[in-house]
């Protein structure tokens, strides 16, 4: 359990045409979520490089959230599959760096998904709060690496 | 690296500055090494500020700019144009969203919003400092358009494109033009006949010399890209001799005795083996059904001069700068047994029923039975919670109601039952619903969980339905005919069309536009547009609107002879690439191929085809491929920027006169606030009293008092004698 003042920092990768407008909608409708959420918008979630995700953890982000287009992606019908592969590859790198794979999540966010986005942020913040600060997590995870059995499969 | 950066932070009236201390941020970034100008501005998008930015860029030799304001969806192009006007490359501009993604969602936490805004702006500065000056990709384009599908949407678009001066190739799979509306009789709302509209459009088509119509033609192969698509089409033969005498051909048609099921009328009638879809079908050249006629050697030899049985499929190559796909839809075909379809006599689909009405001008008869009682069952094959077609086709409600109105106008003593889930006669179509209700049609509402049960009952049909408008009471409806109001589904051949043009398909199997609101007729394939009901259920009016919208877009694209494309495309580091082929494997658009480079193979990107999606980048094992403007250095520097330590000046220590809270620390009070506080500290005051005492306009006092109230600086303390104004005092 984290100390009470801990506010998890989340890096969100969104997509220019679908999920970023959804995140804008949350703002437009004054739906609140944590101010520790920062967004980088890309053309497609299939273009996220695992090294960017690792950079985020290295710099102190406590979690990475991929706001994907899911089946609405206008680039590829296999977008969800490609993005999932990126997450799996990232989780392998995360494990090698003593970072819990639970610190990365993906959900489909559409261009009007204001409430779902805010809900995901609240939920993910709670999970990250339980996991604690990324830096202390690295040490803790290092000790218990072999004991963790409930890792997400992607 | 850019070293002379201009940063502009927008108040957006108060939309941003009410929650984010933009003045403090302006000062903070002024201290950065590579930031030459850092300003907070009331409205960044205002003409006056745009002019000031142009001057700043020129006078200070800025090499990059950052504007922190609203969402890039609103003003990205505004500020790119500012950069261009000042002689700066637009790719050296970054917009930071501190409104929709900062001040508004974090309006409850102004201090944290300011900290976040600082991180966002820092990331923007980092990103722009790594930005490259990229030129747009210039493509030569051929002013010719391939329109696939000669239904109403395709024909209208072809006419508009030709009128605007484009060469148009109109390709139709069927032997005759018109698509679905040629099958329809009267159409809502105008009451015009579909066949009349087809005839009118065809006459207009033929008046343009720059339209070439190909019927019986299918797209076989597509290559090339925006500006120069190379499309092979296959044209099926009609087996009518090119020099045949039309009178003799007509005589042969009249004499032909071989009859087959007529697919055009949903097999409700038979057609001859030499046929047109209907008497006035266009082009006015019949087709020989060679399979049906091949054994009638006597007939064939009698009219040998009219037929040419040696005709073969012909393949033609067309070159077009752009493509418009208007291939339309299919009607949902119920499964055997679905509401008694094919298992109970006299159960038809709505298109079949409309065709039956057209074929029976005097009396409605089917299977030798006079039809008097008709039950329409709505939402068949659409809005399936558990099925494949979850969407609503929305035009079928109106279509069914219009058919019901036609029924009563055309035939006597008709009773119509409408078994519906919801009625969606939106817009002006509601008038038809009202008309149908007034003419005595009976509406019964059912729920998806308890659909009507259709059973044969002697010579009639019995329908059991729970009426949700009368406490779910089970009703039994006796009918002579059941009409299944079927919705639209994607065409059977949409997958093949999608594969040829690489148009993405949605879950509903219709073609996907880039964005339903912002780019409704564009696809991610540059130069390929979609119109009409191939992208989703639409009525005729909406189909034509979308195809004409696509035609206008295409004309704007091609008319200059060249197209300037955004430089956001993949690029390969030739030194690092060792060609493993993984990038080409995942590319949906075949934009990547292998080429020889020295003694090795490397990947090469076709910039005209590349959509800049970036799917190729993460799969590269040696990190040899990246997307311009989304490079590692740009993205990673943004991540660094978010997390860089930020110190917001604590203004509370600088002010002795104002009692501050955490919220108040973020605001630098104007002098007026101090004067108001001094005054109300002496005694509580109303707005008119403050206005008089401070010699300030009442409206200005009101605005500031409201803001002070919002930030918990002041609070109301009773009303004046006339109960017209509140008194205010300082909030402790």
Image: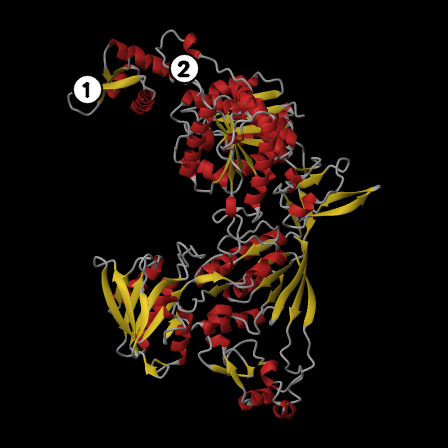
Label 2 sits on a secondary structure element that is helix
Q: What element does badge 1 sit on?
A: strand
Residue topped by disc 2: B665
Callouts 2 and 1 on one subunit: yes
Q: Is residue B434 above or below residue B91?
A: below
User: Residue at position x 43%, y 66% from top?
Assistant: B334
Residue in front for this viewpoint, B312 or B668: B312
Is B171 rendered above or below residue B638?
below
Q: Chain of mark 2?
A: B
Disc sitting over residue A61 in the figure: none
Quadrant position of the N terminus of chain A in the picture: top left
Inspect this view and state whether residue B212 appears.
no
* Residue B590 at x, y percent in the picture: 67, 50
The earlier-in-sequence mark between 2 and 1 is: 2
Left or right of residue B230, residue B265 in this image: left
Q: Residues within 10 Å of mark 1 (few under 14, many from 20)?
A: some
Q: Determine which quarter of the picture holds residue A125.
A: top left
- Compared across the picture, whether B571 is left or right of A141 comes to right
Decide if residue B276 is in sight here: yes
- The quarter of the picture where residue B631 lies is top right
**Where in the figure is residue B699, as x and y percent of width and height?**
31, 25
**Residue with the most extreme left position:** B721
Report x, y in % for residue B567.
65, 41
Disc ID at residue B718: 1
Residue at the spot x=41%, y=11% of the render? B652
- Alpha carbon separation for disc pair 2 and 1: 28 Å
Q: Nearer the viewer, mark 2 or mark 1?
A: 2
Q: Residue at x 67, y 32 (%)?
A: B132
Residue placed furthest toward the top: B656
């Amino acid at each position: 359990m984290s100390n009470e003042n801990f506010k998890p920092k989340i890096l969100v990768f969104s997509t220019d045409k679908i999920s970023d407008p959804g995140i804008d909608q949350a703002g437009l409708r004054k739906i609140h979520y944590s101010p520790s959420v920062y967004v980088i918008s890309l053309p497609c979630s299939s273009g996220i490089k695992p090294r960017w995700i690792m950079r985020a953890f290295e710099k102190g982000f406590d979690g990475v959230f991929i706001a994907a287009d899911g089946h609405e992606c206008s680039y590829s019908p296999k977008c969800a599959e490609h993005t999932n592969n990126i997450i799996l590859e990232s989780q392998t790198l995360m494990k090698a760096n003593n970072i819990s794979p639970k610190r990365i999540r993906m959900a489909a966010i559409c261009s009007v998904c204001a409430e779902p986005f805010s809900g995901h942020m609240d939920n993910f913040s709670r999970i990250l709060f339980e996991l604690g600060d990324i830096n202390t997590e690295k040490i803790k995870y290092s000790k218990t690496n072999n004991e963790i059995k409930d890792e997400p499969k992607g | 690296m850019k070293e002379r950066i201009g940063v502009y932070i927008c108040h957006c009236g108060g939309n941003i500055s009410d929650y984010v201390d933009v003045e403090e941020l302006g000062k903070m970034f002024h201290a950065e090494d590579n930031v030459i100008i850092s300003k907070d501005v009331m409205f960044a998008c205002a003409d006056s500020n745009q002019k000031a930015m142009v001057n700043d860029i020129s006078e200070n030799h800025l090499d990059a700019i950052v504007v922190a304001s609203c969402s890039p969806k609103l003003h990205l192009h505004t500020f790119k144009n500012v950069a261009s006007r000042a002689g700066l490359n637009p790719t050296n501009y970054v917009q930071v969203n501190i409104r929709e993604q900062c001040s508004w969602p974090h309006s409850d936490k102004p201090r944290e919003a300011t900290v976040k805004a600082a991180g966002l702006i820092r990331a923007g500065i980092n990103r722009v400092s790594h930005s490259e000056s990229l030129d747009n990709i210039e493509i030569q384009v051929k002013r010719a358009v391939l329109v696939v599908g000669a239904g109403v949407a395709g024909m209208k678009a072809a006419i508009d494109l030709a009128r605007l001066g484009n060469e148009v190739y109109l390709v139709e799979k069927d032997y005759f033009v018109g698509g679905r509306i040629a099958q329809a009789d009267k159409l809502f709302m105008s009451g015009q006949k579909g066949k009349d509209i087809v005839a009118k459009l065809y006459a207009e088509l033929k008046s343009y010399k720059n339209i070439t119509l190909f019927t019986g033609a299918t797209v076989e192969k597509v290559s090339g890209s925006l500006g120069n698509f190379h499309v092979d089409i296959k044209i099926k033969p009609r087996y009518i001799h090119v020099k045949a005498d039309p009178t003799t051909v007509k005589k042969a048609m009249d004499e032909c005795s071989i009859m087959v099921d007529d697919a055009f009328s949903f097999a409700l009638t038979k057609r001859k083996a030499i046929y047109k879809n209907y008497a006035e079908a266009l082009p006015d050249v019949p087709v020989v059904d060679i399979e049906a006629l091949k054994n009638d050697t006597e007939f064939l030899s009698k009219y040998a001069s009219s037929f040419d049985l040696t005709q073969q499929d012909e393949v033609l190559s067309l070159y077009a700068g752009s493509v418009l796909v208007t291939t339309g839809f299919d009607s949902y075909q119920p499964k055997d047994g679905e509401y008694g379809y094919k298992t109970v006599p006299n159960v038809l689909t709505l298109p079949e029923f409309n065709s039956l009405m057209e074929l029976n001008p005097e009396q409605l008869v089917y299977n030798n039975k006079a039809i008097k009682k008709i039950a329409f069952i709505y939402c068949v094959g659409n809005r399936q919670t558990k099925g494949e077609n979850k969407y609503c086709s929305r035009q079928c409600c109106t279509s069914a109601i219009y058919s019901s109105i036609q029924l009563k106008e055309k035939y006597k003593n008709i009773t119509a039952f409408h078994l519906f889930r919801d009625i969606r006669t939106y817009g002006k179509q509601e008038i038809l619903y009202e008309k149908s209700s007034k003419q005595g049609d009976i509406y019964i509402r059912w729920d998806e969980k308890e659909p009507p049960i259709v059973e044969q009952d002697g010579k009639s049909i019995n329908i059991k339905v729970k009426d949700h408008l009368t406490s779910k009471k089970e009703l039994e409806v006796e009918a002579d005919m059941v009409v299944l109001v079927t919705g639209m589904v994607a065409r059977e051949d949409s997958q093949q069309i999608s594969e040829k043009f690489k148009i993405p398909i949605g879950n509903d199997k219709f073609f996907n536009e880039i964005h339903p609101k912002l780019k409704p007729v564009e696809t991610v394939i540059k130069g390929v547009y979609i119109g009409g009901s191939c992208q989703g259920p639409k009525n005729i009016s909406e189909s034509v609107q979308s195809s004409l919208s696509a035609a206008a877009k295409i004309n704007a694209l091609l008319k200059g002879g060249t197209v300037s494309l955004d430089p956001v495309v993949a690029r390969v580091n030739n030194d690092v690439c060792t060609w493993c082929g993984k990038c080409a494997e995942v590319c949906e658009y075949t934009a990547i191929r292998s080429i020889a480079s020295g003694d090795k193979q490397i990947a090469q990107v076709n910039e005209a085809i590349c959509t800049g999606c970036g799917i190729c980048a993460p799969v590269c094992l040696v990190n040899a491929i990246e997307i311009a403007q989304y490079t590692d250095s740009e993205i990673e520097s943004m991540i660094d920027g978010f997390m860089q330590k930020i110190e917001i000046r604590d203004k509370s220590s600088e002010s002795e006169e104002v009692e501050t809270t955490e919220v108040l620390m973020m605001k630098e009070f104007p002098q007026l606030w101090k004067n108001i506080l001094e005054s109300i500290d002496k005694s509580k005051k109303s707005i008119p009293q403050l206005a008089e005492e401070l010699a300030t306009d009442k409206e200005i006092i009101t605005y500031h008092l409201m803001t002070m109230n919002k930030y918990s600086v002041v609070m109301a303390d009773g009303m004046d004698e006339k109960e017209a104004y509140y008194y205010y005092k300082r909030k402790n």
